[in-house]
Amino acid sequence: MQNDNASYGSASDLLDSHVLGNDKLVEPTMERSRRSSLDANSVDIGEITESPDTEHMSTSAILHYCKSKILLPYLKLLTIMGLRPVLDVSNSSKCAICCSHFHSLQVAILMFLGYLLQYMACFRRDRGFCYKLVPLALTSSLEYDTYKQVCYGNVIFTYIGPSILHFVGFLYSLYLFRISDNEQLQNLMERNQPRGRLETKVENEELKAIVEKQSEAQSTSEIAAGFGVFLLSSYAPQGMPTSKPKRLLRMLWFFILLSVLWMCLSLCSVNLMLAKGNIIFRWMETSSYEVKLVLKVLLIICTLIHDMVQATIIASYCLQAQLLQAHLMFLKERLLNRTITPLHWMREISEFRKLLKYLNDDLAPAVCLFTIVNISWATSGVMWLLNLDKVDTETEPIIGISVLNEFIWMSAVVVPFVQAARLSDECRKTQSVGHELCVRPFLHQDTSQEDISTVLMYASTLQMHAKLFHCPIAGRYLCLVLTITVIVLFSLGMCHYLQ
């Protein structure tokens, strides 16, 4: 623990010296390391755990807060979902590695069991439990006194198809987060580390070696430190803190809490559907009450796991899109405020395009698989509410539960598109950064006209977009879809379909 605190203190002193403009570089390195071990339990860190005020935090406090309050909960959530190893594979025994893989296998088995239980109970995520009454003939084919409940619905389109897409999305996410060499989070968090600027302003070779040594290890501590550097990079060039770190923290927590709220609402919806219906499990009609109760509990648990996996992947996409957006805004401000050379800025934009490519080509397909299923459930539920189902024409939907269910799936569809549109909008604004340089003659009077012209041409030719389904997403497209939706709703209402 002391070694970790020492490394945090060394990194934080470097950041304080560069970002805050203080004179901490005058102190000896070993003295700062010893002092940092005492500062780890200081009052500053204790205060931010209760009321984080990033505008007045020290660097070490922000690093500690980012690790304990943002990064570690996110990594624990990935571990619970089986998307991240429980233990470090490189430093674990074979037994520990097997246990780590067993956890992912256990999550996969529970998900598969959930699909099977949903089919056995005739449970559809778009409308709940679906049964219809079939009369039983007693004396002749014309006399009916009793009825029995049977499932209805196309098995392939209702159960098998959505379940396969949902499970493939989980397997692809498992490969992306656990098996493949996924360093997107580390690269994104460390992208704004002031290494290039430290090489020009810091002459202490020992401090440079500390930073280079920390960049080689990809442990959780270094990732958290990189995340803190990313937040601290939103300080003004003069060293004065701004509200951007606090705003970024709020946005990140907003998406995390939104995913938790979404899972809670989904759990409430499933429980309400269970409470309102008489559930019959296929092939288990003659089982005892205890067995049926166990099956109901397993159905709730497995369905919750389905939603947690989906919410984790969508939240991961939203978090990385938000960080990319903030990173691009910061690069633009650095260029306009002359804290980065035009050549270095173009190199940073080139690295940003690699991060954006990962978001579009690697992480987005997992979100798209879940989105296909969510759109299908949302559309089917709306058509059922409008009495457009050809088979289920007699079942009266419970309005409150049905509306809640539709809200759950529509929100899961809309949020990734909104984040992709916001990121695309920030990418579009970057194309005009060259024009903003030209209208600031006093600030950039020492910059050569050749450099300004180069930035102008380079920025104007940038083609960067956030993509879903391999299609660029923009705010104008979302507005067009919203307009068409409103027109369709008005048209259906005029034709008495919304009675």
Image (tube, rainbow, N blue to C red):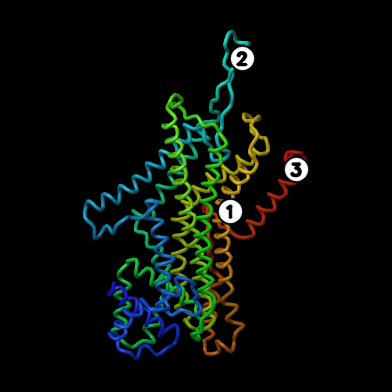
Per the rendering, the mark at residue 144 is: 2
Q: Nearer the viewer, mark 3 or mark 2?
A: 2
Mark 3–mark 2 Cα distance, whole angstroms, equals: 39 Å
Q: Earlier in the sequence, mark 1 or mark 2?
A: 2
Q: Residue furthest top?
A: 139
Q: Between 159 and 87, which is closer to the camera in this rendering?
A: 87
Residue that carries the numbered disc 1 in the rendered image: 414
Give the percent coordinates (x, y) of residue 91: 24, 60
User: Disc 1 and disc 2: Cα gap in Å?
Assistant: 48 Å
Residue lying at 51% horizontally and 46% vertically, measured from the top left: 267
Q: Residue 350, percent across and down?
A: 45, 69
* First in residue order: circle 3 vs circle 2: 2
Can residue 458 be seen here? The reply is no
Displayed quadrant of residue 13: bottom left
Mark identifier at residue 56? none
> How would you rate the neighbour count of disc 1 (Cα within 10 Å): few for under 14, some for 14-19, many for 20 or more?
few
Q: Badge 2: how crowded within 10 Å, few (<14), some, or many (20+)?
A: few
Which of these two is toward me, 4 or 337? 4
- Measured as percent of width and height from the top left, residue 499 is found at 74, 39
Which mark is first along the chain, 1 or 3? 1
Q: In this view, does 115 lie above or below 97?
A: above
x, y percent for residue 470:
51, 53
For the point 57% across and 13% down, which residue is it? 137
Q: Name the residue under label 3.
A: 493
In this rendering, the count of numbered labels is 3
